[in-house]
Amino acid sequence: MIIGVPKEIKNNENRVALTPAGTQELVKRGHTVHVQSTAGVGSGFSDEQYVSAGAKLLPDAASVFAIAEMIMKVKEPVEQEYNLIRKDQLVFTYFHFASYEPLAKAMIATGAVCLAYETVERIDGSLPLLIPMSEVAGRMAIQEGAKYLEKPLKGRGILLGGVPGVRPAKVLILGGGVVGTNAAKIAAGMGADVTIMDLNITRLRYLDDVMPKNVHTIVSNEYTIREMIKDSDLIIGGVLVPGAKAPKLITRDMLKSMRPGTVLVDVAVDQGGCIETCRPTTHEDPTFIIDDVVHYCVANMPGAVPYTSTLALTNATLPYAIRLANQGWKKAAQENMELRNGLNVIQGEVVYKAVADAFGLGYTDVKKFL
Ligand SMILES: NC(=O)c1ccc[n+]([C@@H]2O[C@H](COP(=O)([O-])OP(=O)(O)OC[C@H]3O[C@@H](n4cnc5c(N)ncnc54)[C@H](O)[C@@H]3O)[C@@H](O)[C@H]2O)c1
């Protein structure tokens, strides 16, 4: 198969969909890989590295889209890319269709086959191509939180791990899923006093078993959250109710009970946030302050660490990309339920129910194409 990897052009997006190592794996299996010049630079991969792994370089996005049977990207296509996508071309990337109608309509109009990272789903309901970004964001939440606790950045001026004779900071983590677990691991490793709150007792039981001694678990409810936030130094929001907006676990009035300089990192901001006062911010201007409480609400946290994020993402996407290249999307989707779940739009028809429902579009059963 002929595979094309364009350079990402979305604002501040430095990730790339395929690494030189991934290129080598595809080339080894007899596929041709065309990479747009400088596509990997933001993630630390030079054109020379791609060429020595067997890729062919192309000067611009137009030539990559023109030649490829499968386009591998990271972010959803942006407007300049809409017209480059061809009928029957397979596009394998994050789409998040349900959140942006013009994109859904544009992809329907192209007649392309859109396989979305975010809906590739295992039989147990887990989302293997979303997990790596939650791992990155969870770990980063503590790194950022620790930084904004510093006094010059308007935090309480407390060191996460304390020092001998001085107590460590208290970290409260709302949600014990992928984000919460990764945040807890890093915070505990830095010596903080960590509490994870979740509704799911089975999950808390598991976390209690595997986490170190300085991590405690508490069932999530409004009363306890109100108690806990009074003396927490850093609060991480990592809850998710699949398919719904995040519940507002910390409301506007609760800020008054927090100590000045408390830091809130609402990782769930991409689902509306679980802290009422959060609004999405960017890496250029990540924080704002309300009632002396620092809010960090960056919607694309992994974008700040493109090297790690690219490797984490491509480690997860490559096995699927190899299957798609070896078998073509149709056979791959017939044989692999996870990839079948990833199909959202095929040749002008919406085959993913939630996307069709989001915009009142017609829905076609994917079986029609397989
Ligand atoms: N900002 C970013 O850059 C970024 C990056 C990656 C992920 N995210 C977001 O982070 C959020 C969490 O993702 P995840 O992968 O950890 O999800 P997950 O499904 O693994 O975990 C969510 C957890 O929240 C728990 N939960 C639900 N309601 C709760 C409540 N009322 N109180 C306490 N816990 C509750 C669930 O039981 C579950 O354990 C998602 O919204 C995701 O989109 C954001």
Image: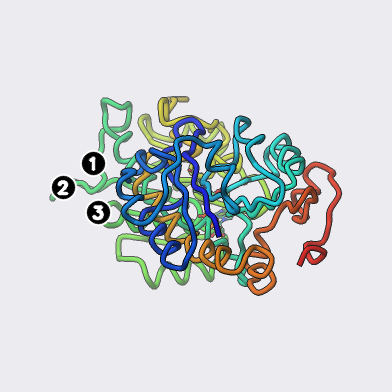
Q: Earlier in the sequence, mark 2 or mark 3?
A: 2
The one nearer the camera, 165 or 32, is: 32
- The residue carrying pointer 2 sits among few (fewer than 14), some (14 to 19) or many (20 or more) residues within 10 Å by Cα, namely few
> Badge 3 is on which residue?
191
Do tag 2 and tag 1 residues touch (Cβ < 8 Å)?
Answer: yes
Residue 212, image x, y percentages: 31, 65
Query: Quick check: can you spot residue 142?
Result: yes
Which mark identifies residue 163?
2
The one nearer the camera, 198 or 332, is: 332
The one nearer the camera, 45 or 336, is: 45
Which residue occupies 60% across, 43% down?
271
Above or below 290: residue 273 = below
Which residue occupies 77% across, 56% down?
351
Query: Which image quadrant: the N terminus?
Result: bottom right
> Badge 1 is on which residue?
159
Rendering quarter of residue 145:
top left
The one nearer the camera, 363 or 273, is: 363
Q: Amino acid at mark 1?
A: Leu
